[in-house]
Amino acid sequence: MTKVKESSTIQENKKSAFEECPVTYVMEKIGGYWKPIILFQLLSGSKRYSDLRKAIPAITEKVLIQHLKQLEADQLLTRKAMPVVPPHVTYSLTKSGLALKPVLYEMAVWAVQDSKENAKTFRRNLKNFPGMN
Amino acid sequence: MTKVKESSTIQENKKSAFEECPVTYVMEKIGGYWKPIILFQLLSGSKRYSDLRKAIPAITEKVLIQHLKQLEADQLLTRKAMPVVPPHVTYSLTKSGLALKPVLYEMAVWAVQDSKENAKTFRRNLKNFPGMN
DNA sequence: ACAAGTACTTACCCTAAAGTATGTAGCTAT
DNA sequence: ATAGCTACATACTTTAGGGTAAGTACTTGT
């Protein structure tokens, strides 16, 4: 009769961690791979759906729209649809979303420092950091 | 005979996106849910394995060690093991890892602004932001 | 002899996220 | 009439990440 682990309180623990650690809070909103990348693209101003696809060619349509919906639900961006044909939809950051600029900016800074080999590309990218004139 | 989509170039695209977008570079290193949280805990100084577990109760041992290994492989932290019994292992940030401090800090700032309800808890947490005296 | 402590490891399962492929609406231009 | 444009939706499959549970090594303390 081996002792049974009493570690079934993970849900509770997750909640308290969420309340104690600010980074956990952030991760709940923009955690994962794609969200910060999408937000980064919108820093330079509102973009059409098709523009986002071009800007992030590695993402699939399904995943892109999926995250756009979630980010909208989380109040980080807003969707504006013009009732025309063909459809014209633009996405732009909310105040909350825009407030993430320092976070994304520091990420870009770090990327430049951290990578030796691709440093040149990144540095160029940093120069025209969206909305940082 | 419907036209077949020629979208099998995702790997190439991913590579070019990686070279163009600094945030993508960052996501490859600290993307996902847990890594930023772990790094955040280490900002206040090196910690033992068991300390990390206590600090992040919601994470399971398997996932924790899994990420520690990866972060070590990515040169964000180092592992130091003392050859004693019971084992004594400490993890601490490398220069690269420490350089993430501004990123994590801005995240914490954002978390405070973004949340109304939990603002108090977060603000208290911000006051003693690790290594920011 | 055996329980306890620490830092793991391994095996198995399950779910959520992501990828693939195709379809659709509704008007426009040819 | 049909192809083309945009912004999706939907079904189906695959993969990666995470969760659960249990085991291991090696010595000290009782």
Image (tube, coloured by chain):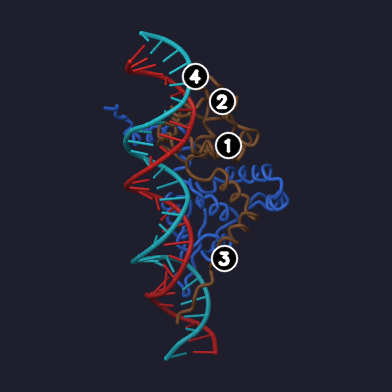
Chain colours: A brown, B blue, C cyan, D red
Q: Residue at x 55, y 45 (%)?
A: B100
- Residue at the extreme right of the image, as rendered: B120
Looking at the picture, does residue A126 appear above or below residue B96? above
Read off the residue under disc 4.
Answer: A85
Q: Residue at x 50, y 73 (%)?
A: A5
Q: Nearer the viewer, mark 1 or mark 2?
A: 2
Confirm or deny contact between disc 1 and disc 2 (CB under 8 A): no
Q: Is residue A124 visible?
A: no
Q: Give the CA distance from mark 4 to mark 1.
A: 23 Å
x and y, in percent, of residue A133 in the image? 60, 24
Subunit of label 2: A
Q: Give the CA distance from mark 3 to mark 2.
A: 44 Å
x and y, in percent, of residue B101 in the image? 58, 46
Which corner quadrant of the image does residue A130 belong to?
top right
Q: Give the CA distance from mark 3 to mark 1.
A: 31 Å
Whether marks 3 and 4 lie on the same chain: yes
Q: Give the CA distance from mark 1 to mark 2.
A: 13 Å
Read off the residue under disc 1.
Answer: A72
Q: Nearer the viewer, mark 3 or mark 4?
A: 4
Q: Amino acid at mark 3?
A: Thr
